[in-house]
C-alpha cells in the first residue's frame, strides 16, 4: 500500500522552508568573503547575471521534477526517465560533501555565540588559533550535526517549517539593523565602493575572468541549494495547485536580498576596521567581533546575532540531510530516525577530517588544497555544476520543455511568462555556459 506523501501545511510554509534551505552560511558567511576574494563589484555583476540565466531556470526545473514525480531525488529523476536516476544520485553525493564541510562552519558559529561574552581581548588572530585546535571545534561540529539530526527526525512539516517560519524574519530584521550600523562607520564608504563600483584594473587575463566566473557560478548553485536534488525533494512535498514560478521568484529574491545585505554589513566594516577584504573564510569571524566590540551591549547583540546565523545554518543543513535521508529511508526501508543518525554520523566523520585540516591534518593536501578546501571545491565547482548541467539536459531534452512547462503552469491554468527564458536556458544557455566555465576553470 502506498502511503500518502507528507505535504507542506501551507504555501508560506513551503516558501519559508525552501528559503530556509537557500539562506544559510552561503549568504552570511560565504558570500561576503567570496566577493572579497574575487574583486568586489565585478563579481557581484557576474553573480547577478548567472542568477538570472542559471539560478532561476534550474531552480524552477528542480521543483518541477520533484512535484511532477512526487518522490525522493533519485526516484523522481527515474520517473522522468529510468536511465536518469543517477542525476539524483550525484546530488545525494554532493549533499553529503556539502553537509560535511557545513558542519565544521556551523560549529564555528556555535563557538562564537559563547565567545560573544569574552570579546574584551579579542583580536582577529583568535579565529585562526581557534580553528586549528584539535579538539574543541570537533565537539561543536558534533553538536551542530546532532541538532540537525534531531530536527530532521521530527518529520517534514512539523520540524522544518516551524523552525523556518519564525526565525527567518527575525534574522532579516537583525541583519538589516547591523547593515545600517556598518555602512555609517567611519571609512565605510570605501567598502561600499568596493562592493558596488566595478574596478576592472585587477582583471588582466582570461584566467582572471574565468576564476571569477567559476566562483560566481559555484556561489549561485551553493546559495540557491541547486544541483543536488534539494529542491526536487522539497518540490515533491508541494501540493499540485501551487504556483512554482512565484515560489521560485520569492525564494531567489529573499536569498539574494540576504546575501547582499550581508555584503553591505561585512564589507564596509572590513574597510572601516582596516582588515583585509581578501581574508577568505575567516572574514565574518574576524570582522563581526570588531563591530560588536564597538557597540554598547555588543556582547549581547553578538550572541543573538550568531544564534540567528546558527538557525539559518541549521535550516540549510536540515535540507541537506533531508535529501540524503529521504532517499536512504525509501531505499532501505529503515526509519527516518535511524537513517538520519546514519547519514548525520557519516557526515560528521568526514567533518572531523575537515575540521582537523586547519591544524593537525594541515599537512594533507589533495590537489594542493587542504581537506576542507577540497570538499568545498569539489562540491561547488565540480559536483553542483555537473548536477545543474544534467538537470538541464534531463528537463530540456529528455523530459522536454512542453511537459515541463505544463507542470510549471499547472496544465496551462497559470500563465508562464518566463517560458521563453526557461526554454532557452534549459536547452542552450545554461548547459553551454556551465560547460564553458567548467572547462576554462580547469586551465
Ligand atoms: N544554500 C545553502 C546556503 O546558502 C546551503 C545548502 C543547503 C545547499 N542545501 C543545499 C547547497 C543543497 C547546495 C545544495 O548556505
Image (cartoon, rainbow, N blue to C red):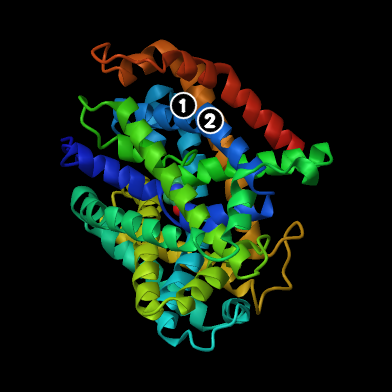
The secondary structure type at the circle numbered 1 is helix
For the residues bearing labels 1 and 2, Cβ distance under 8 angstroms: yes
Tell me the residue that label 2 is attached to: 54
- Is the residue marked by circle 1 packed among few (<14), some (14-19), or many (20+) residues within 10 Å? many
What kind of element bears circle 2? helix
The residue at the point 32 percent across, 56 percent down is 173
Task: Estimate the x, y position of residue 326 in percent, counting from the top left.
Answer: 33, 46
The quadrant holding residue 270 is bottom right
- Give the residue pinned by disc 1: 57
**What residue appears at the point 46 percent right and 21 percent down from the top-left corner?**
395
**Residue 145 screen position, x and y as percent:** 39, 67
The answer to whether residue 77 is visible is: no
Rendered view: 439 above or below 430:
below
**Residue sitting at x 65%, y 69%:** 274
**Camera-side residue of 165 and 96:** 165
Would you place residue 298 above or below residue 327 in this image?
below
Circle 2 Cα neighbour tier, 10 Å, few/some/many (<14 / 14–19 / ≥20): many
Amino acid at each position: 500500500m502506498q502511503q500518502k506523501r507528507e505535504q507542506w501545511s501551507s504555501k508560506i510554509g513551503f516558501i519559508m522552508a525552501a528559503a530556509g534551505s537557500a539562506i544559510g552560511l552561503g549568504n552570511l558567511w560565504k558570500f561576503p568573503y567570496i566577493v572579497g576574494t574575487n574583486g568586489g563589484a565585478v563579481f557581484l555583476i557576474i553573480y547577478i547575471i548567472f542568477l538570472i540565466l542559471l539560478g532561476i531556470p534550474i531552480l524552477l526545473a528542480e521543483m518541477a521534477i520533484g512535484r511532477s514525480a512526487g518522490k525522493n531525488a533519485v526516484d523522481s529523476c527515474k520517473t522522468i526517465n529510468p536511465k536518469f536516476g543517477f542525476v539524483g544520485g550525484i546530488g545525494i553525493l554532493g549533499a553529503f560533501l556539502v553537509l560535511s564541510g557545513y558542519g565544521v562552519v556551523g560549529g564555528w558559529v556555535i563557538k562564537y555565540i559563547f565567545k560573544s561574552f569574552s570579546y574584551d581581548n579579542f583580536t582577529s588572530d583568535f579565529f585562526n588559533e581557534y580553528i586549528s585546535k584539535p579538539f574543541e571545534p570537533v565537539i561543536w561540529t558534533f553538536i551542530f550535526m546532532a541538532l540537525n539530526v534531531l530536527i530532521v527526525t521530527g518529520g517534514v512539516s512539523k520540524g522544518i517549517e516551524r523552525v523556518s517560519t519564525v526565525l527567518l524574519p527575525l534574522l532579516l530584521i537583525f541583519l538589516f539593523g547591523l547593515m545600517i550600523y556598518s555602512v555609517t562607520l567611519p571609512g565605510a564608504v570605501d567598502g561600499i565602493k568596493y562592493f558596488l563600483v566595478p574596478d576592472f584594473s585587477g582583471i588582466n587575463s582570461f584566467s582572471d575572468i574565468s576564476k571569477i566566473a567559476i566562483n560566481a557560478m559555484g556561489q549561485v548553485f551553493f546559495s540557491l541549494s541547486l544541483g543536488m536534488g534539494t529542491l526536487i525533494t522539497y518540490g515533491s512535498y508541494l501540493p499540485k495547485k501551487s504556483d512554482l514560478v512565484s515560489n521560485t521568484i520569492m525564494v531567489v529574491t529573499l536569498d539574494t536580498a540576504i546575501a547582499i545585505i550581508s555584503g553591505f554589513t561585512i564589507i564596509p566594516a572590513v574597510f572601516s576596521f582596516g582588515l583585509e577584504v581578501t581574508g577568505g573564510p575567516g572574514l565574518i569571524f574576524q570582522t563581526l567581533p570588531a563591530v560588536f566590540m564597538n557597540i554598547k551591549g555588543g556582547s549581547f547583540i553578538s550572541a543573538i546575532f550568531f544564534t540567528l546565523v546558527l538557525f539559518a545554518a541549521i535550516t540549510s543543513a536540515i535540507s541537506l540531510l533531508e535529501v540524503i535521508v529521504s532517499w536512504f529511508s525509501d531505499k532501505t526501508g529503515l526509519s527516518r530516525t535511524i537513517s538520519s543518525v546514519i547519514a548525520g554520523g557519516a557526515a560528521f566523520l568526514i567533518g572531523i577530517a575537515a575540521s582537523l585540516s586547519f591544524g593537525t591534518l594541515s599537512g594533507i593536501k589533495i590537489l594542493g588544497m587542504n581537506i576542507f578546501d577540497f570538499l568545498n571545491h569539489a562540491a561547488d565547482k565540480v559536483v553542483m555544476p555537473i548536477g545543474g548541467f544534467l538537470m538541464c539536459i534531463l528537463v530540456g531534452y529528455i523530459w522536454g520543455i512542453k511537459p515541463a512547462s505544463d507542470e510549471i503552469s499547472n496544465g496551462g491554468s497559470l500563465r508562464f511568462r518566463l517560458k521563453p527564458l526557461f526554454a532557452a536556458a534549459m536547452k542552450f544557455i545554461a548547459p553551454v555556459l556551465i560547460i564553458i566555465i567548467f572547462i576554462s576553470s580547469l586551465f
